[in-house]
Image (spheres, rainbow, N blue to C red):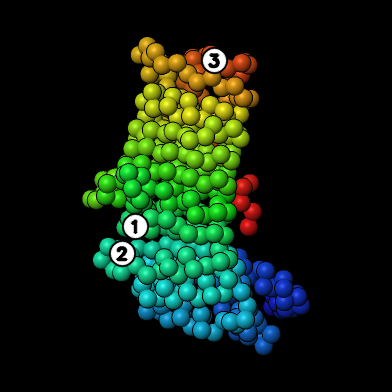
């Protein structure tokens, strides 16, 4: 048990820290806890008003009214002369008016990183926060997640954005049943699409962006009235270096360029081997190929059925790895038995001999995927 004297000394050490150090520590705290520091001493009374990070979560409050009032008071009490670097806002339990107010405040204060989660059904409630986001000239990171499917504009005009993560959104076609939402994101480097869909008559999702380097497509089959899972993705991404595919539908993939800079391909699926071969034909310039044990098992099953599809010619391949999910029911012994046959089949047209490596790792995480491509 810490004595009262030791506790007092520890408080003194904290109080003696330079202000910039204290503000840096506050960046990692929830805003509710940051505001609470104002009772520590006179020095702390107004320190929270100069924080560059705001993190609002409904779960930290007993009721919606308290949450909404707290958010409003923080926005009105914060030092308006200081730019805002990072905003995390959970809109669950709030109302659309407050959501708009928070986003408008962030944009007016030159926010760079924005994470928004919402449970509003904007097919019933008018959605007016998109124009606020698209008016930003400072935003470099945007993570947008919705409970009900969120319909996005046909084109996302975010000229300074470098990293975009979208969950449970839908895209609308321009013409010819094709949606092309990312071509106006001039600086986009990393894109994550999770549980996305197409609206109305759209059947093709075109990912067209000359700067895009990293792409993750993670889709689970869902049936939502008025929305469809894309039948096809067309890549027009000449500088793509990494792609992760976690899909459980028979999605076609094609490319308008040869993806000559492609370094990494990660695939986790249990669709037919013919579909996987379609993906690999498009991605055959890859240097490092990683398949999940689930993908390996499906390919082995189809090979056992005398599948006759010719594999791609991997002219640049240097590494072939099997990623073993510890939660999988497939044992390492089974994996070793399957990987030899799959490797012999898959690499028969490759110029060099590669031995697959088994990696006992957790499933692909967003930290693994984006960590080395986007440094905050």
Secondary structure of the residue carrying numbered label 1: strand
Looking at the image, is mark 3 or mark 1 earlier in the sequence? 1
Residue at 45%, 57% in the rendered image: 156
Give residue 122's quadrant in the image.
bottom left
The answer to whether residue 173 is left or right of residue 376 is: left
Q: Which mark is residue 122?
A: 2
Q: In the orientation shown, which residue stands out farthest toward the left? A: 225
Residue at image position (35%, 13%) is 305
Picture layout, residue 223 above or below residue 51 = above
Location of the C terminus (image quadrant) = bottom right
Dot 2 or dot 3: first in sequence order is: 2
The residue positioned farthest toward the bottom in the image shown: 42
Q: Callout 3: few (<14), some (14-19), or many (20+) C-alpha neighbours within 10 Å?
A: some
Q: Is residue 73 left or right of residue 176?
A: right
| Residue 76 visible, this orientation | yes
Q: Nearer the viewer, residue 124 or 39?
A: 124
């Amino acid at each position: 048990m810490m004595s009262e004297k030791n506790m007092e000394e520890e408080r003194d050490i904290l109080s003696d820290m330079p202000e910039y150090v204290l503000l840096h520590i506050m960046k990692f705290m929830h805003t509710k806890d940051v505001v609470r520091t104002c009772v520590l001493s006179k020095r702390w009374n107004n320190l929270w008003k100069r924080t560059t990070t705001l993190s609002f979560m409904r779960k930290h409050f007993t009721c919606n009214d308290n949450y909404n009032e707290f958010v409003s008071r923080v926005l009105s009490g914060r030092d308006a002369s200081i730019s805002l670097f990072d905003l995390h806002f959970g809109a669950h339990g709030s109302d659309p008016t407050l959501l708009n107010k928070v986003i408008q405040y962030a944009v007016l204060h030159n926010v760079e990183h924005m994470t928004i989660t919402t449970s509003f059904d904007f097919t019933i409630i008018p959605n007016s926060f998109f124009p606020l986001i698209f008016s930003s000239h400072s935003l470099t990171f945007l993570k947008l997640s919705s409970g009900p499917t969120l319909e996005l504009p046909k084109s996302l005009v975010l000229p300074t954005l470098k990293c975009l993560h979208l969950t449970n959104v839908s895209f609308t076609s321009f013409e010819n049943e094709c949606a092309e939402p990312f071509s106006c994101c001039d600086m986009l480097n990393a894109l994550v699409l999770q549980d996305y869909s197409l609206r109305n008559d759209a059947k093709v999702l075109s990912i067209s962006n000359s700067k895009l380097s990293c792409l993750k497509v993670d889709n689970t089959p869902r049936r939502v009235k008025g929305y469809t899972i894309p039948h096809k993705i067309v890549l027009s991404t000449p500088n793509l270096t990494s792609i992760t595919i976690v899909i459980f539908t028979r999605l076609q993939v094609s490319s308008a360029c040869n993806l000559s800079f492609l370094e990494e391909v990660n695939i986790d699926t249990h669709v037919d081997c013919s579909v996987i071969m379609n993906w690999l034909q498009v991605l055959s310039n890859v240097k490092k190929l990683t398949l999940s044990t689930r993908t390996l098992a499906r390919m082995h099953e189809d090979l056992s059925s005398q599948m006759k599809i010719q594999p791609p010619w991997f002219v640049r391949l240097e590494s072939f790895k099997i990623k073993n999910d510890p939660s999988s029911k497939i044992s390492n012994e089974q994996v070793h038995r399957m990987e030899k046959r799959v490797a012999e089949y898959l690499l028969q047209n490759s110029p060099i001999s590669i031995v697959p490596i088994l990696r006992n790792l957790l499933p692909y995480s967003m930290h693994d995927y984006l960590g080395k491509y986007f440094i905050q």
